Structure formats: structure tokens, C-alpha cells
Image: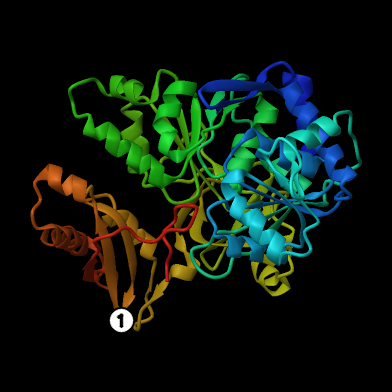
Amino acid sequence: MAIQTLRELVQYGVKEHGDLPAYRYKVKKEIKEKTYSEVNRDTMAMSRAVEALGMKGRHVAIIGATSYQWIITYLGVTCSGSVAVPIDAQLPADAVCELLRRADVEMLVYDEIRGDVAVAAKASCPQIQHIVSMQAQEEKDGILSFEQLLKDNAGEYETAIDPEQLCTILFTSGTTGISKGVMLSHRNLAENATCLDMKIPRGNITLTMLPINHVYCLTMDILKAYQVGSVVCINDSIMHLQKNIKLFQPNMILMVPLVIESLYAKLRAAGDAYPKQAVAKMAFGDNLTTICSGGAYLNPDYVEKFAEYGITILQGYGMTECSPVISNNLEWDNRTGSVGKLLPNCEAKIVDDEIWVKGSSVMMGYYKMPDETAQALCDGWLRTGDLGYIDDDQYIYITGRKKNLIILANGENVSPEEIENELGKDDLIKEIIVREKEQVIQAEIFPNYEYAEEAGITDIREKLQEIIDKYNSDAPVYKRVLDLTVRDTEFEKNTSKKIKRY
């Protein structure tokens, strides 16, 4: 039977993997473990708490780092038939409150690391009826205790959930413009998480790395685990990533390209003193074999580079509006250069060079933004905004973003990403943005200063110009880079670690 709701997904996890560890996480120096049966017990208690507080069917916001409490709150809210609204834990309190108001949130569950949000919400969000602390041991000053709510509401819980009903509102962290509240149904999330058989073995150990408010982590780290029986280890901080890889010994990690690139720099820095696979084991422990890459473009060269260290990179493609996965490469059919094969529940077509997608993963729309919804959806087709093509085997190739397209005075269209990807292959270039400036193509580059020092490069600008000149010698006239700006600092990024374009 197809899994159509998150409640069905949790129940499937209990039935198939009940006594298997679902989560491992640190509490101070001790590693705690929760089984799939224990997760179901706590999920039902949270669902009962939501209903007892009169919040069934209402919108409940969650803010904080990835934690067991965060996960149980999300599952408890959605499995009660209510709507979960994950909020980016890195946003300032006033921005959080704006999102709480825009999403009609009536209950807030927060991690104490964002206690400022609880204070601000009390002062400026009168629609919020209940505020819950994930760490508080008991109710105090009107703030409820997560732990006490679970104790007081222990017991069985079931309710009817329509697969088409609203399950979650996820705010985009786009590189331009106002964030939009993406409305995803139970079917959107459940089918995206379960429709593709990746042949992941039961008991596979994964380590969370991405922020849990992002749908890539939520769907592919958290929800998919209930289908395959993964043991999900919770990384408590990006600063502790390498340490936690050695501690938890994962087989697989989901990453964004920026992290993959930085990890490769550490591998390369080890030099040739040891065999490459030995270097990888020293850095990542004995078990890491697979990295799933998403969230942005990854230079295909990294697939080959990591293969030399015995690690397979599977590049995928998706967006929040598609719950999020659209296509994925697989262990046994990994096509370098593509972003993978369409998921079984998706179909795609090319309209004026833009990729359009249709299927059960496509969002319901943007919350209270009918104009933006109409621009994004056309007869059930999602306009992705990505330029590319699809081969005969349904593998997708991305060439750029439609909104970033440079249209020159002579009418030629240039994809800046195409040039960025080509120039970015050089180790001296750490970050790059290509844009139009006064009718010519400009490259703004943040160099890899550490690499320059290691390589003995004294005149960085001159070396960058040589790289550009070499590119220009083979490029069509209209694609040549004629202006160079060298940065001393990194580009500003959003919380998904994508460079902001202005």
C-alpha cells in the first residue's frame, strides 16, 4: 500500500523497524538512543498535547537546531492533522515574528538557544496562544514544558488525515526577494520520501548536517528513514561535524556543495603521505561511503575526486516547491554531469529552455500569495526557474537559472552559471559570481587565499586574469569575461549557504 500521510509513514516505521534505533544523539557527553517504537509513543503524546491545548488543525511553529525534541514536535503536530511551520533558527527575532504573523501561527515551540524569540513573540504576536520550551522542566511564567506535555498526554492517538490536506508551511530562503511560504500536503511529503527505492539497507547509519527547517533534511534525512529503517544520528553543530562523523560512524551524509568543497580541501591538504582511502578513513572514520549532494550545483569534478578516496557522491536536484526532490542519481546508475533521473512520481518537460515539473510532489501553492502562486504553477506544472534539458533516459541536466540569465545588447543570452562552473574548476577560485556590468560580462571572485599561499602565488589578481584569459581564448565572443573584481571577503550567503545575488 502506498504511504500517503506522515502518520502512515510513522506507523510503517513502527511496524517494520519497531525495535531498531531510529535516533542517536548526544546529551552532554552521553549518547542517547530512541527506537522507532519510542518515537511513535512520543509522537502520539505530542499529538494528544496539541489537541488538549485546543491547537488541533491550527498552525504550530518550531524553531531551533536539529534535536530529538524538534523532530517529535514536528511529527506530533503533523500527525494530529495540524500544520507545522518550521522556522530558520538563524533569523533575527523580529524577522521570525514577521513570519509567525504571516503564517497565522497560534502556538510556538522553541529551543532555549532562541529564547529571544519567545520573548519577542510574547510582545508582538498576540495571535500566539501557547509557547512551549523544548528544555524547560516545568511550566513557568506562562511558558509550557515540552517534557511535561509528553508526560501529561501519554497514550494512544489516532485521527483521520486527508492526504491532500495542508501538512506544513516552509519558508524559502531565496537569494533574492521576499521569502514565500510553500504549502506542502501530506501526500507531497510522504510520496516524495518513499517513491524512490534507493536500495538503502535497513540499519544504514546517517548523520544530519543540514538545518532541519530545510525540506531537503526534513524529507531525506528524517522522513525517508521511516521507510528504509535508517539510524539517524543528530549532528549538534556544523562546527563539530568532523568530530561527530568519527563518533557516530555514518554510512551516508546529505551535504550541500559548499561543505563538500571544504571537506575536499581538507583531504587534499593531507598530501600524498598516505594512500587516499586511508586519508578518508582518518578524516571520516571507517564507514562513510556515500554523500548525497543537493541544494545547489556541484561541480562534477568532485564526483571523480571523492571517488579516488573511496566515497561515492550522488548528485540530486530539487526545490522546496517540490517537497523537495525532483531527480536523483543512484549508486548503480550515477551519471556524472547530470543531477539524476526523474523520481517515479514526477514528469518533466522543457518550455522555452525552462524545466517544468508535474507530479504528486508539487506544492499546493504559496501561503496567502495568490499572484506568486499563479506565476509558479500552470495547469499543475511547476515552473522551476531552472534552465536545462532532459535526455532520453529521463536524466536532467541543469545549465542555469532563468532569473539570472544575462541578456546582452546584441540579443545574445548568457547563463552566468555556465561561466561560473567553468572558471570555478580552478583551485584558486573559491567563490565566484558572473553578472553583466555596463554591457560586458564581469566576474567577481573571492580567491582561495590558503591555496594561493600553498602554491606560492604572490600576485593573485594576475593569476586570476590568466585563468580568465585562458577561458576567453576558447569561449565565443559574447561569452567572454571582460571585467574582473577581486574580493577580500566571502560573498554574503543565505542560511542555505547559497550566495546572495543582487
Choose between 297 and 274: the one closer to the eye: 274
Do we see residue 103 in this rendering?
A: yes
> Please, which colouring scheme is shown?
rainbow
Q: Quadrant of residue 357?
A: bottom right
Residue corresponding to mark 1: 439
- Residue 479: percent from left, percent from top: 29, 69
Q: Amino acid at mark 1?
A: Gln
- Residue situated furthest top in the rendering: 19
- Residue 449: percent from left, percent from top: 20, 51
Choose between 185 and 342: the one closer to the eye: 185
Please tell me which residue is depicted at 31% across the width and 35% down the height of the picture.
305
- Residue 491: percent from left, percent from top: 35, 60
Q: Secondary structure at mark 1?
A: loop
Left or right: 248 in relation to 1: left
- Residue 193 against residue 299 in the figure, above or below: above
Crowding at label 1, few (<14), some or many (≥20) Cα neighbours within 10 Å? few
Quadrant location of the N terminus? top right
Do we see residue 332 in this rendering?
A: no
Quadrant location of the C terminus? bottom left
Please tell me which residue is depicted at 62% across the width and 56% down the height of the picture.
117
Please tell me which residue is depicted at 61% across the width and 44% down the height of the picture.
112
Choose between 289 and 270: the one closer to the eye: 270
Left or right: 396 in relation to 118: left
Left or right: 193 in relation to 177: right
- Residue 109 against residue 237 in the figure, above or below: below
- Residue 283: percent from left, percent from top: 34, 26
- Residue 11 against residue 80 in the figure, above or below: above
Choose between 289 and 32: the one closer to the eye: 32
- Residue 32 against residue 153 in the figure, above or below: above
